Image (spheres, grey):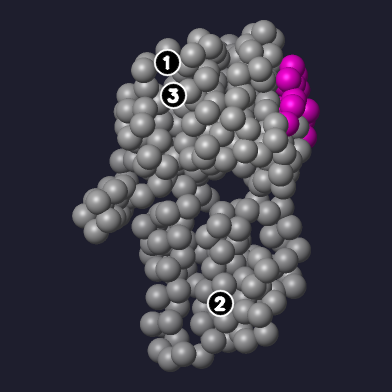
Amino acid sequence: MAVAPTFAKHDLPLLGSTFLTDRAPELAKRWNNVFFMLGSGGEYAEALLNLLDEQRKAGKIGDKIAMIFVADAFGVDAAAAARKAAARHGFKLVLDKSYPIGSQDLSPLLNEAKAQAPDTFIAFSYPPDTVLVSDQARVLSFNPKVFYTGVGTQFPFFKAKYGPGLEGQMSTGGVAGDSPLIKEYFARHKAMTGKEPDSWGSPVTYASLQILQQAIERVGKIDRKAIVQEIRTGTFDTVLGPIKLQDQVLKGIFQVGQWQNGVFQGVAPGNLKGVKPLIVPKPDWKN
């Protein structure tokens, strides 16, 4: 976001495939050339808690949630959004604690969470913390029905590290695993780089580049203002399917995913094409 004023000054389109802020509607009014491709943090929290509410109504989980989060802007903001969504849906936060960035041992927090016997565990974590939480939860035999961790859960290194042992683990993002477009994208990405892409920001980033390419082609010349206007109003064919931005914000992408048979599959929102049911309870840990 730091570069947004400079982009606006020169009428350059800025497609933010890593922006995640609840200020998107406000900032879109300030800068008509900035596009928010991941939506807002509040939307992710609401998608998760709405999904948990559905599982509770179906009798699959109870109302106790244990939540931990890294003590920086990302963790604090994500936890605040989840806290509000949990209250709206009538869940009980039996643990709600932060941990310092760079923590090397989270077992005390995990033991504290385990002692509360929650059906749902949520960690708003960075990749090193996500691995630490996942490793130490196994050691402590802490395996609630819903196990949700943060950034890194969607990444190919996570799949390579845990293999079948990550079945049922959840996080942000997700893809329509049966989509021919997604399958083709994953195959081409692996052929070029030797690795699969992640299942959150990577396909969104690629879709943003497809939008930019098609906008330029339709305008037919490098007219920055016209290209920005085309992005604002046009409909585009992408790896995620047809996309039309709403007030400069990308809607209709998966906000909750779960590892299912080797695919980080989108499970919410439930009205999206290619969504699959949540696996509850999460299977036992496998080493």
**Which secondary structure, mark 1?**
loop
* Relative to 117, residue 155 above or below: below
Residue at position x 36%, y 31% in the image = 161
Residue at position x 72%, y 66% in the image = 27
Residue at position x 56%, y 34% in the image = 129
Residue at position x 25%, y 51% in the image = 194
**Dots 1 and 3: beta carbons under 8 Å?**
no
Is residue 89 rendered to the left or right of residue 206?
right
Task: Point out the stretch of residues depicted in magenta.
Answer: 84-98
Mark 2 highlights which residue? Answer: 13
**Which secondary structure, mark 3?**
loop
Q: Amino acid at mark 1?
A: Trp
Q: CA distance from mark 1 to mark 2?
A: 45 Å
Q: Nearer the viewer, mark 1 or mark 2?
A: 1
* Relative to 235, residue 98 above or below: above
Please identify the quadrant where the N terminus is shown: bottom right
Could one spot residue 72 in this view of the protein? Answer: yes
Is 115 in front, or is 202?
115
89 in the magenta segment: yes
Q: CA distance from mark 1 to mark 3?
A: 9 Å
Q: Amino acid at mark 2?
A: Pro
Q: Quadrant of residue 264?
A: top left
Q: Which mark is residue 121?
A: none
Labels in figure, total = 3
Could one spot residue 172 in this view of the protein? Answer: no
Q: Which mark is residue 168?
A: 3
Mark 1 highlights which residue? Answer: 285
